[in-house]
Structure formats: C-alpha cells, structure tokens
C-alpha cells in the first residue's frame, strides 16, 4: 500500500494493495499500524455507510464543535470526492482537493478534522464507507454550498441531486465565524 501526500496539509491519498483472483478481490481497508503515516489524528470511533444513486451530491459538510477526521472508501461504483481546507490559520485555507474513488482502484482518502467534505456519484449507484475520528453531533453540523463560486470546485456534474439541507447552505465567505481552527498538524 502507498500513502501519498496531497497539496493540502494533513490530507492523504491511500492506495491499498488489491489482491485479485478468479473469485474476485481482497483489500485491507484499514490497519492501524500501517495507516500511522497518514497522521490520523486519533482513534476512529464511528463507521458510516451511505448508498447513493447516480448524480447525487452529498456535501459540503463539517462539524464545528466535534470535527471529524474521515477515512473514506468506495466499496461499490465510483464517486468524485472533494475535501476543502476550512481550518482558520491553515497554510492551505480555502483550497480544495478532488479525486475519483472507485471499487476498481479501492483508492482511499484520509480527510483530517476541520475539512469540509463532499462527493458526487459518477456510477449508477455508489456504496460509500467511512471511518470517523469523532461521533456525529447534530448540534455541531455545518455546511458550505457545493458550488460556492469562490471555491470554484470542478465538480464533474452540473445539476446534482441534493438534499434540501445541502441546497440551503451558505458560501464559505458567509461562514467565517463558524469555522474550525487549524491545529498546526
Ligand atoms: C452523518 C450522519 C447522519 N445521520 C442521520 C441524520 C439524517 O437523519 C440521516 C441522513 O443524514 P445526512 O443527510 O446528513 O447524510 P449525508 O448527506 O450523507 O451526510 C454526510 O455526508 C458527507 C459526505 C459527510 O462527510 C458527512 O459524514 C455527513 O454529513 O442520517 C446519523 O444518524 N449519523 C450520522 O453520522
């Protein structure tokens, strides 16, 4: 497996070894000792799974009071996954990184606490599995509008299927008093 840095501080792309044979394939999608190099902030305490149809876009989400680090794996289909550095004081504040994750490459992304996260679905359906370093806290849930013109994220779809909540989020510039702080890592 390879753990690759990205241009954003603390955000890592992980290329696990995929063992294929006549039956299919096997992948280790997490092993604590091997993932240390991704500087994962603290133990994972919650696993999530979402299933989405083509054209769905979930995001851009973050938690203010209990920021979650996320190890993301696509177990079915393919998505375009986006992480945005919204940590006040970060050297890469306001920058975003996008990458295709799929059940073919089994590529993963580790997103540190303090990032906004979202993805859109490129295949007929997508199974999205992710480990979190803090628990879900509805009171701390925040979001940024998926097509914030200042972020100018190059989403590969133009008219996504969004939840009402996601449609109502504001732009980053309107959220400056509700952003997590950079921890220096
Ligand atoms: C996130 C979450 C949601 N829920 C409940 C709350 C709602 O009744 C229902 C759907 O929630 P929501 O529409 O917020 O789900 P997503 O749009 O997939 O949200 C996620 O999407 C982006 C991509 C993320 O990175 C976050 O993990 C998360 O915000 O599940 C829970 O019970 N626990 C949870 O941890």
Image (spheres, rainbow, N blue to C red):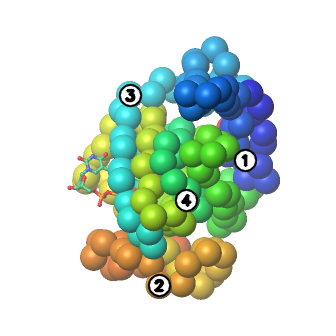
Frontmost of labels 2 and 1 is 2
Mark 3 is surrounded, within 10 Å at the Cα level, by few (under 14), some (14 to 19) or many (20 or more) other residues, namely few
- Up the image or down, 73 lies above or below 163; here it is above
**What residue did someone put label 2 on?**
159
Quadrant (top left, top right, bottom left, bottom right) of the C terminus: top right
In this orientation, which residue lies closer to the viewer: 95 or 81? 81
Badge 4 or badge 2: first in the primary sequence = 4
Q: Residue at x 56, y 78 (%)?
A: 157
Q: CA distance from mark 2 to mark 1?
A: 30 Å
Q: CA distance from mark 2 to mark 3?
A: 34 Å
Frontmost of labels 4 and 3 is 4
What x and y, as percent, mark residue 122?
Answer: 54, 66
- Up the image or down, 49 lies above or below 84; here it is above
Mark 2 is surrounded, within 10 Å at the Cα level, by few (under 14), some (14 to 19) or many (20 or more) other residues, namely few
What x and y, as percent, mark residue 6?
Answer: 77, 49
Badge 2 or badge 3: first in the primary sequence = 3
**What residue did someone put label 3 on?**
45
**What residue did someone put label 4 on?**
79
Frontmost of labels 2 and 3 is 2
In this orientation, which residue lies closer to the viewer: 182 or 119? 119
Q: CA distance from mark 4 to mark 3?
A: 24 Å
Q: CA distance from mark 3 to mark 1?
A: 23 Å
In this orientation, which residue lies closer to the viewer: 37 or 16? 16
What x and y, as percent, mark residue 25?
Answer: 59, 30
In this orientation, which residue lies closer to the viewer: 49 or 10? 49
Mark 1 is surrounded, within 10 Å at the Cα level, by few (under 14), some (14 to 19) or many (20 or more) other residues, namely some
What x and y, as percent, mark residue 56?
Answer: 41, 69
Q: Residue at x 42, y 49 (%)?
A: 127
Question: Would you say the residues marked 2 and 1 are in contact, meaning their CB atoms lie under 8 Å apart?
Answer: no
């Amino acid at each position: 497996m390879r753990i690759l840095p990205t241009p954003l501080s603390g955000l890592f792309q992980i290329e696990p070894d995929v063992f294929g044979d006549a039956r299919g394939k096997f992948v280790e999608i997490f092993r604590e000792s091997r993932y240390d190099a991704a500087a994962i902030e603290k133990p994972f305490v919650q696993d999530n799974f979402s299933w989405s149809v083509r054209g769905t876009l979930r995001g851009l989400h973050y938690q203010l009071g209990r920021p979650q680090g996320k190890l993301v794996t696509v177990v079915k289909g393919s998505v375009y996954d986006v992480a945005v550095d919204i940590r006040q004081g970060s050297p890469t504040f306001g920058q975003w990184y996008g990458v295709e994750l799929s059940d073919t490459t089994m590529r993963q992304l580790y997103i540190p606490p303090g990032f906004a996260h979202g993805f859109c679905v490129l295949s007929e359906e997508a199974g999205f599995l992710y480990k979190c370093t803090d628990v879900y806290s509805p009171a701390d849930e925040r979001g940024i509008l998926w097509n914030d013109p200042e972020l100018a994220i190059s989403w590969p779809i133009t008219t996504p299927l969004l939840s009402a909540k996601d449609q109502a989020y504001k732009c980053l510039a309107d959220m400056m008093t509700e952003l997590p702080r950079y921890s220096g890592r």
